[in-house]
Amino acid sequence: MLVNCNSCQKKFVVPDSAITVAGRLVQCGSCGTKWTQFPIKEEKATVSKNFISNKIIGSTEIKKIAPKRKKRKISLYTEEYLQKKHGINIKDPQELSVKKRVKANFGFYSYLITLIIFLITVFGVLNLSKEVIVSKYPTTESYIYYFYETINILRITFTELLNYFFN
């Protein structure tokens, strides 16, 4: 069945079984208008006549005529349209673009530097308080010293790599 929108005149193809005798609430995908659609009996007769005439004609082709679209009278991005349709009030478009430029991004490298500073701080605090931790919890002594020995080995490895590549 061919359904026409009453507001924007757009046409939609809907299966005949989708619309019952009691009618069905449909919505236009283009403009959003809702209405109750009842089955149309005239359309079935024209569709069947066109189908029969197509079979009889055979080799001749029937050109489909596309409906002409109406041009919009108002642009979708003007202040008046946004205020009327969506309730959005734009005071100064140039002011918005300035605010966007001022906004600072906290990108990948900023996060990386923050993480490195955080880890250095945590390792420093742990290094300063390792005697206090060992005195309160003697079983952690081997773990803490092993941890700092591993960090020292990594530091020496990176230092040697940097010396190798830059000298």
Image (cartoon, rainbow, N blue to C red):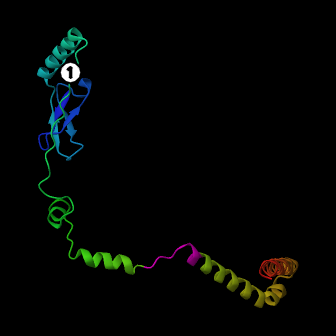
- The number of callouts visible is 1
Q: Residues within 10 Å of mark 1 (few under 14, many from 20)?
A: few
The location of residue 79, given as percent across then percent down, is: 17, 67
> Is 110 one of the magenta-colored residues?
yes
Q: Nearer the viewer, residue 84 or 66?
A: 66
The location of residue 101, given as percent across then percent down, is: 38, 78
SS of the residue at dot 1?
loop
Residue drawn at point x = 68 percent, y = 80 percent? 119
Residue drawn at point x = 20 percent, y = 61 percent? 86
Q: Is residue 21 above or below residue 104?
A: above
The location of residue 51, given as percent across then percent down, is: 21, 15
Q: Is residue 142 above or below residue 28?
A: below
The location of residue 63, given as percent across then percent down, is: 20, 25
Asked which quadrant contains residue 94, the reply is bottom left
Residue 103 vs residue 94: left or right? right
Which stretch did the figure color magenta? Answer: 104-111
For the C terminus, the image quarter is bottom right
Q: Residue furthest top?
A: 56
List the residue tagged with mark 1. Answer: 62
Q: Nearer the viewer, residue 102 or 143?
A: 102
Asked whether residue 55 is in view, the answer is yes
Asked which quadrant contains residue 122, the reply is bottom right
Residue 76 vs residue 100: left or right? left
Residue 144 vs residue 39: left or right? right
Asked which quadrant contains residue 44, the reply is top left
Residue 165 vs residue 17: left or right? right
Q: Is residue 64 above or below residue 86?
A: above
> Is 24 one of the magenta-colored residues?
no
Residue drawn at point x = 82 percent, y = 89 percent? 131
Q: Nearer the viewer, residue 158 or 45?
A: 158
Asked whether residue 129 is in view, the answer is no
Residue type marked 1: Ile
